[in-house]
Amino acid sequence: MSNGCVYLVGAGPGDPGLMTVRGRDLLRRADAVVYDNLAARRLLDEAPPQAEMIYVGKQASAHTLRQEEINELLVRLGREGRQVVRLKGGDPFVFGRGGEEALALVEAGVRFEIVPGITAGVAAPAYAGIPVTHRGVTSSIALITGHETPDKDESDLDYAALANWPGTLVFYMGVKNLPKIAASLMEHGMDPATPAALVRWGTTARQETVTGTLSDITEVAARAGIKPPSLIVVGHVVALRQSISWFEGRPLFGKRIVVTRARLQASRVARQLEDLGAEVIELPAIRIEPPADTAPLDAAAADVSSCDWVIFTSANGVDAFFDALQRAGLDSRALGGVRICVIGPGTAERLGRFGLKPDAQPQSYKSADISRTLAGIEDLGGKKILCPRADIAPKDLIVDLQSLGADVTDLAAYRTVGETPEPELLDELFAGGGPDWITFTSSSTVTNFVNAVGLDRLRGSDASLASIGPTTSATMRGLGLEVDVEAAAHTIPGLVDAILEAQPPREQ
Ligand code: SAH
């Protein structure tokens, strides 16, 4: 037997945080990943970049595989000695055909392991505030497939037994059959007043829940336009949602928010917004690249100890400068006798990663305040000042410092390059009214996003626009865009606060 192993791993119901630690560990060292349509697509980023990613999802249109072909694929990859993660939504053995795949591996003599996942039938109700069992209400739960072989008069399900089931009924894949399910349960004697719910896209920012009774749930779901993937929950526990509902009440729940920052920096703002319940769409308008020629930056870094001041106006500038310092064979001690100014707390925090604290930080985050702050500390006449910045940074800071007599070196430490999002992604995003919010964290995100999306489409959408500060807002207005909110503190938390404050109060 080769060293290959196929891990049948449950990816959980949708929230990427609901995968097991073991599953994630295996994913991080997989060399092949075989996956379906996953609600938690972001989990795929956990796989190493060199891993082979094989999509076998069941979608009518795409070139996807039949179950036998998937089984053969898993056997082949295992025989090749690969570490294969077969990633499935929810739990692999709950309506996931994991059993069939395991049997195929047994038969072929390929080593395998099972990593259970949180099944949607328990997790989606939980996120809707419905405990699937509750002391004194119900002590059992049935997981049922609501998908039945079409064109068959006889039902695959024993509705007489289900109607008398002493507990909660959870139907997977049942939306299409909802009228039949509800009617059959009542026909077999279940009380029409029994509470029932549908939960769509449970545990994700798109979660939608409707409730009713067995007698009206079909109509309620149809009116709300509930489609798959949804679960149907029938039982008295549904009534507990009234008190326990929590997920859908978070302040930004249901809001679709676009983050336009460079991908590497987007995660912080994205996580903060997601923690408040928003669905975040990362559409980086820019990416950060090294300058075309790094020689001037390298030379300046090697000679930094001869400077009086270094001014950092962004976290990217800090990173680029310390990369250059390292290339020069130096470390933070080269800055021992040099004073450091940063533009704001984000930049200060990045500097802290290199063990350094700033000597100066202006009151506001505007570059005009930097020269004023430094001049307040000492006479800048003849002082040698290094400014490692973006290639496109405005010149006013340099001019201000020079007018105070300083000897300034303005260095392009990094380049801001426009990103082109995929046209299909944009079409999808702006279909209907578009997203609820678009966030801009610098002038370059504004100009590049407008370039990519088009001014007309942006103006024509219902999206509200959020700006991190006056410079970014000025760029927006210059392009004819309206600034709906501007952060009071020109930081990421400030931007998130501004969006939060703009939310209308929720009905209780
Ligand atoms: N193995 C999976 C189930 C696969 S069957 C698990 O254990 O969860 C697919 C069905 O699961 C869908 O038709 C839907 O009924 C249900 N489902 C999966 N994810 C869901 C989600 N996030 N919200 C609601 N239902 C979901």
Image (cartoon, rainbow, N blue to C red):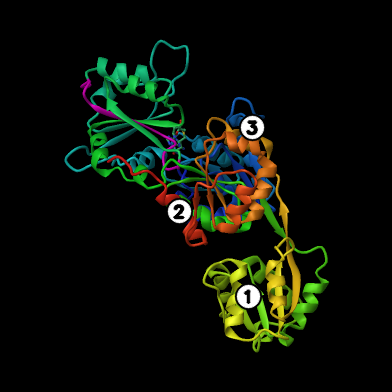
- Residue nearest the observer in this picture, 97 or 207: 207
Q: Which residue is mark 3?
A: 69
Q: Position of residue 20 (x, y in %)?
A: 46, 52
Query: Which residue range is magenta in the image?
Result: 190-205
Give the position of the C terminus as an image quadrant: top left
The span from disc 2 to disc 3 (Cα, nearest Å) is 51 Å
Q: Earlier in the sequence, mark 2 or mark 3?
A: 3
Q: Position of residue 365 (x, y in %)?
A: 56, 66
Q: Identify the element where label 3 is drawn.
A: helix
For marks 1 and 3, give the CA distance.
Answer: 67 Å
Amino acid found under the numbered disc labelled 2: Ala
Out of 310 and 334, give the one closest to the viewer.
310
Q: Is residue 200 magenta?
A: yes
User: Residue furthest toward the left?
Assistant: 136
Q: Which circle, 2 or 1, is nearer the viewer?
A: 1
Residue wearing tag 1: 371
At label 3, counting other C-alpha atoms closer than 10 Å, the crowd grade (few under 14, some 14-19, many 20 or more) is few
Q: Earlier in the sequence, mark 1 or mark 3?
A: 3
Question: Please, what is the dominant secondary structure of the magenta stretch?
Answer: loop
Q: Residue flagged by tag 1: what amino acid is it?
A: Ser
Question: Is the CB of mark 2 within 8 Å of ligand 1?
Answer: no
Residue highlighted by disc 2:
498
Answer whether residue 27 is visible to the viewer in this image. yes
Q: Decide: is 142 above or below 362.
A: above
